[in-house]
Amino acid sequence: MKTVRELIKEAESRLDDEHKDVNVAKVLFYHLAHKEPHELYLMMNEEVDPELEAAFLKGMDQYYQGTPIQYIKGYETFFGRDFIVNEDVLIPRYETEELVENILYRIDDYFSDDREIHLCDVGTGSGAIAITLALEEPRLKVIATDISEKALAVAKENASRLSASVEFRAGDLLEPLLKTNEKVDIFVSNPPYIPDDQEIEAMVKDNEPHVALFGGNDGLYFYRRIFQEVKPLLKEKALLAFEMGFDQRELMEEAIHQFFGDHPFEIIKDMNGKDRMLFIYYHLK
Ligand code: GLN
């Protein structure tokens, strides 16, 4: 029989040999054993329960074979809440929490009365952005869309588990909103933005949905389509908020000038100092 310490050490040393993230062993163990770090410390010298050991070894095997830990666990934490994830949705990123935070700041700045604020999130994936906004800002009335029915099934499940009121619609880009003549105060999207031929980490490329990652030759395919089609969807004054690639500032500025002329906009850096968020103030500043 093995102790918890031995089981974890063995996994950590294999991870180290394979130049993989050694933290994964503990992260998986906490998850399967339903323990917090301080509780794990207390049980290190105990013998591992055989069922727990089997589940741990199975999960570690999936990780050695290249599956992201979030898909193995089945969820990722975003803005303090657990969102179910599987291969049909992109794993929510830390940078996207920053996008949500910055949208909330701007809601306070630009929508100060207490009327209902209409917001749409296009390409919602797991629903992380739409659901978080709906829960954080009760004035919001949120519609979220995705072209992938499988992604929408995950997003709906997340909304129901987290008791968020979000309306989900299936369809290509703006089509599900345009066809009902929707008008929004806030348009949000984290579209696929990686250029088709960019080299990305194998763990991302081999597991996460390409429909959520790749955005044409220069990564801006979906932004240009949105910019071109979005105006009928906007109220007289509106805020547009996007996540974007760290190396897209120049191309983005060009596209904004082409479709939005002189409307003010801002590109904001993430915590790593990389250009990551775009806000366009449509008749708003
Ligand atoms: N941030 C993601 C990544 O780097 C890409 C997300 C997206 O294309 N919207 O993997």
Image (cartoon, grey):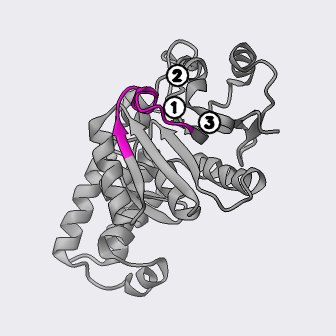
Quadrant of the rendering where the C terminus is positioned: top right
25 is within the stretch colored magenta: no
Q: Disc 2 to disc 3, how far (Cα)? A: 11 Å
Image quadrant occupied by the N terminus: bottom left
Instruction: Name the residue carrying label 3.
Output: 242
Which residue shows up at 51% across the image and 58% down it?
Answer: 134
Rendered residue at 27%/56% (across/down) = 59
* Circle number at residue 191: 1
Q: Disc 2 vs disc 1: Cβ atoms closer than 8 Å?
A: yes
Going by the numbered disc 2, the residue's amino acid type is: Phe
Mark 1 close to ligand 1, CB under 8 Å:
yes
Of the two numbered discs 2 and 3 on the same chain, state the one appearing first in sequence.
2
Q: Dot 2, how many residues are within 10 Å of its Cα: few (below 14), some (14-19), or many (20+)? A: some
Residue 69 visible in the displayed image: no
In space, the residues marked 2 and 1 are separated at their CA atoms by 7 Å
Badge 1 vs badge 3, beta-carbon distance below 8 Å: yes
Instruction: Identify the residue under disc 2.
Output: 222
Determine if residue 258 is in view. Answer: yes
Residue at 66 percent across and 49 percent down: it is 103
Asked whether residue 180 is drawn in magenta, I would say: yes
* Magenta highlight range: 168-183
Question: Residue shown at 27%/48% (left/top)?
Answer: 62
Element assignment for label 3? strand
In screen coordinates, is 119 left or right of 44? right
- Dot 3 crowding, Cα within 10 Å, few <14, some 14–19, many 20+: many
- The mark nearer the N terminus, 2 or 1, is 1
Q: Position of residue 206 (x, y in %)?
A: 35, 32
Q: Amino acid at mark 1?
A: Pro
Q: Which label sits on residue 21?
A: none
Residue 248: where, in percent of width, then height? Answer: 68, 23
Q: Quadrant of residue 234?
A: top right
